[in-house]
Image (cartoon, rainbow, N blue to C red):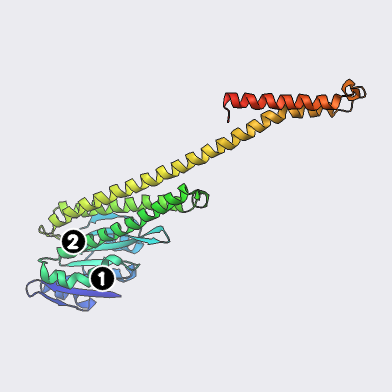
Amino acid sequence: MTNVIAFDFNSKTITSPPPDGIQAVIDAGSYCWIDMDRTSDAAAILDALDVGPDTIERIAKDLIQGQFIMAQNCIHFTLLEPQLDSNILCLNTLHVVVGNGYLATIHNQPSAVLAHLRETYEEDFSANAVSGGFLLFEIADYLIGEYRATLTKISQHVETIQKQLLENDGDKILTGASTELTRSLLDYRNAVISARETIYELATRRHPYVSETTQPYLDRQTISLERLAGDAATERAVLSEVLNLYMGIVSHRTNRVVDRLTIVSLIFLPLNFLAAVYGMNFEFMPEIHWKHGYLLFWGVVSLLVTTLILLIRYRRWV
């Protein structure tokens, strides 16, 4: 499905022309926002806007990666929208094509960023907009809002894992949720850095499709993206420290168990030796015929065990 919104900055009016009338509206001086919810619908419309075949092919592939490409007649860049599903981060690709008199957005998944933009573009257009660049600013602003909300959810999940680990419930989540969360944090940070580079390119490079009045506002957005990338790195470091702390606790507990087993083995090793000796079926064993041989055996065992226990306590092996 394709939705077209045309903005006339002279008369401050908004219209909704049909997809086949986009070029005529642009030629009349309006600026168009073209939103397509399937990449398969983009080829015909973008071709009519004189977008090159290389750009159309990249959009059709819909690779989940950030990119910024200045083509001959347009700028094509992709933004990665975050979506947290069961504490697993999913990244949806939002293609944006900016050309002479239009901004096109193409996506295969529902876009929360564009949903916010649809709710507010009329008010923003009437109040402050002087060029089509206001759409770029709003997209960047709402994208940052989505990144911030996603990072808040991830931070809460990190705190939950930290509590579970410290409450001795780590075995259930150590190889599951924590691994997925570590990967999500890395993917999140890469997506934010990619968005920061894209917004920086839009804010600093000279090109006819982004007005100079818009670029300072876009440049400010890179600061927020830089902070989000730093916060994501901090959350990843915190999660790593928590996991390392838990592994240290587990290692310490294991060492204590091994120490106890070693002490038990130390006590029973000489007893096993005595039992093995007197369990042999030799025909001649003088101790067997002693009147008090049995009591003597237990006396030796008791003395040996007592001596070992006193030695262990004296050496503070436990």
Q: Residue at x 44, y 41 (%)?
A: 245
Amino acid type of the residue that numbered disc 2 sits on in the rendered structure = Phe
Mark 1: give few (<14), some (14-19) or many (20+) Cα within 10 Å: some
- The circle drawn on residue 271 is none
Q: Quadrant of the C terminus?
A: top right
- The residue at the point 52 percent across, 37 percent down is 252
Residue 52 in sight in this render: no
Instruction: From the top left corner, tell me how far across and down residue 133 is, in percent.
Output: 15, 63
Question: What residue is shown at x 46% (from left), y 48% (from top)?
Answer: 165
Numbered mark located on residue 35 in the image? 1
Left or right: 268 as drawn, with respect to 180: right
- Give the quarter of the image for residue 7: bottom left
Q: Residue at x 89, y 28 (%)?
A: 281
Q: Name the residue at the top extreme.
A: 286
Mark 1 to mark 2 CA distance (whole Å): 16 Å
Q: Which mark is residue 137?
A: 2
Q: Secondary structure at mark 2?
A: helix
Q: Earlier in the sequence, mark 1 or mark 2?
A: 1
Task: Say which of marks 1 and 2 sits in front.
Answer: 2
Q: Nearer the viewer, residue 303 or 257?
A: 303
**Local crowd size for mark 2, using a 10 Å CA cut-off: few (<14), some (14–19), many (≥20):** some
Viewer-nearest residue: 8 or 233:
233
Q: Is residue 295 visible?
A: yes
- Residue 182 lies, in percent from the top left, at 41, 49
Please state if 166 lies on the left or on the right of 130 as rendered.
right
| Image position, residue 140 (x, y; %) | 22, 60
Residue with the most extreme right position: 283
**Type of amino acid under label 1:** Asp
